[in-house]
Amino acid sequence: MKPIHRVKLSVFADYHQFYVWDPELCDSHAPEEWTDQDVADRAKIETGVVVICPVRNMDVPVEVSIWACEPSVHFAEWQHVVVCPLSVSSGTIQVHECTGEALAEFSVAAGDYTVRCLFSGLDTLSENGLEGRDRYRVQIWPAHTPGLTVMKRWEEPT
């Protein structure tokens, strides 16, 4: 099975975040209230937006793909996996930088989508946190998901 759309991006993850959203439904605004749990989950959701939180606040490699149905995944390849809902009413899903602009835009049918965020290389950061081999994959398909679930959790070393 192949994705309907796939794009590889370099995303500036300012404030350790970037967004997958319906720009109209979320009014192009991300959540501002964060809990310790949100930070530990490395993701946060609100109506029409999924915030994804990379370990670096630098340019990070992100692959985004849209699928007709749930794609297979080899969980052993990933250190942290989050699954969450995304409502789309405008027919548009954007990948948007925190302090930048939209980097990708996909035309989709309005409805409920599931977003799976996959994280790897989280333990490869340099001492100053600016360099690393971390990478992120975002898979999106039409399906209802009741809430944010961490399927696999990576704990930052202390």
Image: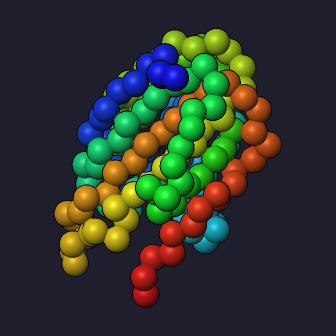
In-front residue for pair 133/72: 72
Q: What's the coloring here?
A: rainbow
98 lies left or right of 128: right
Seen at 49% across and 58% down, the residue is 76
Residue 92, visible in the rendered structure: yes
Residue 103 position in % (x across, y down): 34, 28
Seen at 35% across and 41% down, the residue is 62
In-front residue for pair 74/123: 74
Please, is residue 104 above or below residue 129 in the view?
A: above
Residue 5 position in % (x across, y down): 44, 19
How many numbered circles are shown? Answer: 0
Please, is residue 21 above or below residue 117 in the view?
A: above
Picture quadrant where residue 71 is located: top right
Please, is residue 69 above or below residue 38 in the view?
A: above
Residue 102 position in % (x across, y down): 38, 28
Please, is residue 153 above or below residue 48 in the view?
A: below
Residue 24, visible in the rendered structure: no
Q: Quadrant of the C terminus?
A: bottom left
Q: Residue furthest bottom?
A: 158
In-front residue for pair 127/7: 7
